[in-house]
Each structure stands twice: as structure tokens, then as C-alpha cells.
């Protein structure tokens, strides 16, 4: 992890950039909060190294991610909505591209259904990659008795 001075320089660069634009409200933390958080992140790294649960790579990635999040701009509601709409549209396109492969996988599913089969069927139905008519009679009968089917009906009723 970089030194506190280097990180604070990055923060000040972001601060000055936003000040020029007149958008200081986009800062996630104040300067003193930033320094306090950097110290907490350093303490987190030390604690994780002692626990030997995560390797050095994961600890550094986590620390860098926490710093980057603090340096991110706060988006406006319109910016968030625009990003959500763009991601939803991209996901829909990706789901449509994956649909033929999903339908082939569905044909190979047989009873008795295991948990992964039930979850996959539920996920594919929500993504509109398959529909209930594509399920074989045996698979549908078993899927109909699952909690995921009940959740699916509730979601469909809300629409």
C-alpha cells in the first residue's frame, strides 16, 4: 500500500479537481475522515496478515479497493438511474445471447431435481431465457413444489 502522504496527495488532487468544477459535494469523505480511514485500512491489513486467512494479494486488493471507493465521486440520482438503465439493457442483451445454450442445458435436466437445477431454472425463468412451457412435464411437476416456484409466482403477480 502506498504511503499516507501519497494517498493524501491523490485525495487533494481529487479535492482540487472537484473544487474547480464547483462540485465539492461529490467528495465521499472530508480530509480528516480520509486520513482516519486510511489508518483503519492499514490496521485492517495488519490484522488480516496476523490471521493468515487471506494471502497478501487479497489483502492488498482489498486495501486498494477501499481507498478507491473513498476517492470515487458521489453520483447524482440521474447518473445512477442512467447507469442502472444501461446495465439493465446490457444484461438483457447478454441474457438473450446466452438463451440458446441455457435451453440446451435445460433439456439435459432430469428428475429428481437437485438444488442447483432448481436454482438454475428459477434464474433462467427470471432472466426470460426460458419459459415454463419449455420444462418437461416431470421437471415442471417437481419444480412446482419448490420454494423457488412460489417466489416466481409472487414476483410475477407484482408485475
Image: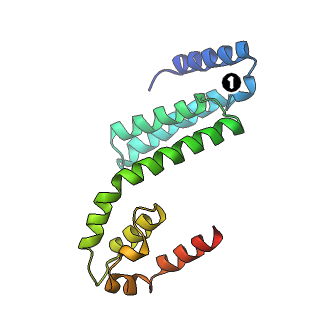
157 horizontally vs 98: left or right: right
Q: Position of residue 62 (x, y in %)?
A: 45, 39
Q: Residues within 10 Å of mark 1 (few under 14, many from 20)?
A: some
What is the x, y in percent for residue 30?
Answer: 71, 27
Label 1: which residue? Answer: 31
Asked which quadrant contains residue 20, the reply is top right
Instruction: Tell which of 127 and 66 is nearer to you.
Output: 127
Q: Spot the residue most to the left.
A: 108
Q: Secondary structure at mark 1?
A: helix
Q: Quadrant of the N terminus?
A: top left
* Quadrant where the C terminus is found in the figure: bottom right
With 78 as the anchor, is 47 left or right in this view?
Answer: left
Q: Quadrant of residue 19?
A: top right
Query: Residue 141 at what x, y percent from top left?
Result: 39, 87
Q: Residue at x 36, y 50 (%)?
A: 97
**What residue is shown at x 64% (from left), y 70% (from top)?**
158
Q: Nearer the viewer, residue 27 or 101?
A: 101
Q: Nearer the viewer, residue 1 or 75?
A: 75
Residue occupying image coordinates x 34% and y 71%: 116
Amino acid at each position: 500500500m502506498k504511503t499516507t502522504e501519497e494517498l493524501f496527495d491523490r485525495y487533494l488532487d481529487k479535492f482540487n479537481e472537484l473544487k474547480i468544477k464547483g462540485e465539492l459535494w461529490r467528495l465521499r469523505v472530508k480530509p480528516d475522515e480520509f486520513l482516519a480511514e486510511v489508518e483503519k485500512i492499514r490496521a485492517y491489513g495488519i490484522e488480516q496478515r496476523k490471521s493468515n486467512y487471506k494471502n497478501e494479494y487479497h489483502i492488498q486488493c482489498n486495501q486498494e479497493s477501499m481507498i478507491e471507493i473513498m476517492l470515487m465521486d458521489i453520483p447524482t440520482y440521474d447518473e445512477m438511474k442512467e447507469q442502472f438503465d444501461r446495465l439493465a439493457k446490457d444484461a438483457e442483451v447478454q441474457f438473450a445471447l446466452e438463451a440458446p445454450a441455457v435451453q440446451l442445458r435445460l433439456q439435459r435436466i432430469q428428475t429428481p431435481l437437485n438444488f442447483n437445477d432448481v436454482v438454475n431454472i428459477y434464474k433462467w425463468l427470471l432472466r426470460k431465457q426460458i419459459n415454463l412451457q419449455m420444462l418437461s412435464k416431470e421437471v415442471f411437476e417437481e419444480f412446482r413444489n419448490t420454494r423457488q416456484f412460489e417466489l416466481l409466482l409472487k414476483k410475477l403477480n407484482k408485475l
